[in-house]
Image (cartoon, helix red, strand yellow):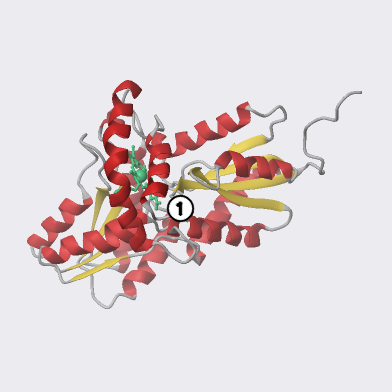
Amino acid sequence: MIQPPDHPRVALGRVGVLLVNLGTPQDANPAAVRRYLAEFLSDPRVVEIPRAIWKPILHGVILRTRPSKSAHAYRQVWGEDGSPLAAITARQARALRERIGDGVVVDWAMRYGKPALADRFAALQAQGCDRILVAPLYPQYSAATNASVMDALCDALKGMRWQPAIRTLPPYYDDPAYIAALAQDLATQIEALAFRAEVLLLSFHGMPARTLQLGDPYHCHCRKTARLLGEALAPRFPGLRIDTTFQSRFGRAKWLEPATDVTIAAEARQGVRRMAVAAPGFSADCLETLEELAIRAKETFVEAGGTDFATLTCLNDGEPGMAMLEHLVRRELSGWA
Ligand SMILES: C=CC1=C(C)c2cc3[nH]c(cc4nc(cc5[nH]c(cc1n2)c(C)c5CCC(=O)O)C(CCC(=O)O)=C4C)c(C)c3C=C
Ligand SMILES: [Fe+2]
Ligand SMILES: [Fe+2]
């Protein structure tokens, strides 16, 4: 007797959307952070050092020292609903589901850790999705983020006999909808500050400087976002100086400059007293914004003589950001209409 085929037993013909972000530990303790960092930092898209050299450093040094330091940082931002990055991404998926509705299945996944991309992708297919839009929530393209999502997606597809059709959301660093959402959201936050900021710092996550020479467009994408955002904000805030920096240096190699922490200290030493910082490259608040900027960068600024410092929130699941995401997703899905 011939066995029945191993494929979904529900009606096909549905469209799925999978929002993907970086990933985060399951818990804020050193063991969970270690598991997360081991997966993240083993990805050759993230650390582009020959494996024979990197593996002993990762296992012999980094994974012995960093988990407890990072766990301490995670504990300071951990919420009742867990890691902010995961909680906010879940809320973004829920909000998008409500906005798009009409038979489109919306889910979310993480590139590292849980919910795993391969699992949620398979779950969409099991719900009858034969067309799936994979949307990495990275406005600026980098191989470490976007290409790594594609690697994981293709690994998942490799194991499937009956593959769904795929679209991926292109980077949207200069999309007018993204720039407008950021300008509107940041302007509202700047106007609500209890002080008048002299400087607005646009802080992007860093990358090794070498990636620029290797042809990664990330640095150029960040610069263009910053220029367009600066042009959109300038008329509303005459006298506000807007600068771009790169944060989160990791390892010994030279990273993109200027560095956020170095710039913040230098600005305060040169007499700047009131500063706001925004992180337009992050779709959701996370360790990098809530701990590195809102806690550590603020300390740096005040220790160097600054008086007022505000870390502005990311677009998260607020109205401007969700309207933008709905627009970007609908535009991609219209190709399947
Ligand atoms: C927004 C884009 C990001 C790029 C580009 C990126 C590159 C990159 N990151 C590391 C190393 C680490 N990043 C860490 C946290 C982290 N990184 C991003 C985003 C980008 N990274 C986010 C959203 C987060 C926060 C995750 C969270 O749980 O909230 C960490 C872990 C935390 C820590 O121990 O400091 C590391 C390590 C490299 C090496 C890299 C480029 C090659
Ligand atoms: Fe990172
Ligand atoms: Fe960091």
Q: Quadrant of the C terminus?
A: top right
Q: Is residue 106 above or below residue 249?
A: below
Q: Is residue 49 above or below residue 177?
A: above
For ligand 1, tell me if the residue under mark 1 lies within 8 Å: no
Estimate the x, y position of residue 253 in percent, counting from the top left: 21, 34
Quadrant hosting ligand 1: top left
244 sits to left or right of 314:
left
Between 165 and 11, which is closer to the camera in this rendering? Answer: 11
Estimate the x, y position of residue 283 in percent, counting from the top left: 44, 54
Q: Quadrant of the N terminus?
A: top right
Q: Is residue 168 above or below residue 85?
A: above
Estimate the x, y position of residue 43 in percent, counting from the top left: 41, 33
* Residue under the image location 46 percent in, 47 percent down: 23
Q: How many marks?
A: 1
Extreme residue toward the right, this view: 1
* Residue under the image location 67 percent in, 46 percent down: 16
Which element type, helix, strand or loop, lies under badge 1?
helix
The quadrant in which residue 187 appears is: bottom left
* Residue under the image location 42 percent in, 42 percent down: 35
Estimate the x, y position of residue 144 in percent, counting from the top left: 39, 36
Between 295 and 150, which is closer to the camera in this rendering? Answer: 295
32 sits to left or right of 335:
left
Q: Amino acid at mark 1?
A: Pro
The quadrant in which residue 38 appears is: top left
The residue under label 1 is 176
